[in-house]
Amino acid sequence: MSDMPHSLTAQDSLIAVMIAVSASDENIRTSELIT
């Protein structure tokens, strides 16, 4: 059970980074569409 939090934290961090990257990509795309 002690290993679960660490693995979940690592996965959560990776997912958070992927979401941030996808969000930034969407912002760039929307800005390009607006301009």
Image (cartoon, rainbow, N blue to C red):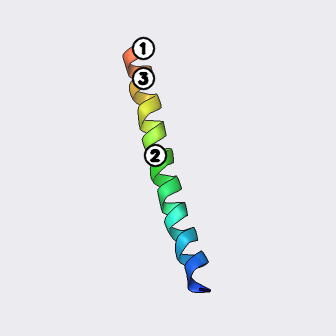
> Total number of numbered labels?
3
Question: Which residue shows up at 37% across the image and 17% down it?
Answer: 33
Q: Which residue is more in the foreground, 21 or 15?
A: 15
What number is the disc on residue 25?
none
Q: Amino acid at mark 1?
A: Ile
Measured from the top left, where is residue 22 in percent x and y? 43, 42
Q: Earlier in the sequence, mark 2 or mark 1?
A: 2
Residue type indicated by callout 2: Val
Residue 7: x and y in percent read 52, 76
Q: Which residue is mark 3?
A: 30
* Residue 17 can be seen, yes or no: yes
Judge from the rendering whether residue 14 lies leftward or rightward of residue 33; answer left or right.
Answer: right
Towards the viewer: 31 or 3: 3
Badge 2 local density, few (<14 within 10 Å), some, or many (20+)?
few
Quarter assignment of residue 34: top left
Number of residues whose C-alpha sits closer than 10 Å to that of mark 1, classed few (under 14), some (14–19) or many (20 or more): few
- Above or below, 35 against 3 in this view is above
First reached walking from the N terminus: tag 3 or tag 2: 2
Q: Which residue is mark 1?
A: 34
Give amino acid for label 3. Answer: Thr
Label 3: how many Cα within 10 Å (few below 14, some 14–19, many 20+):
few
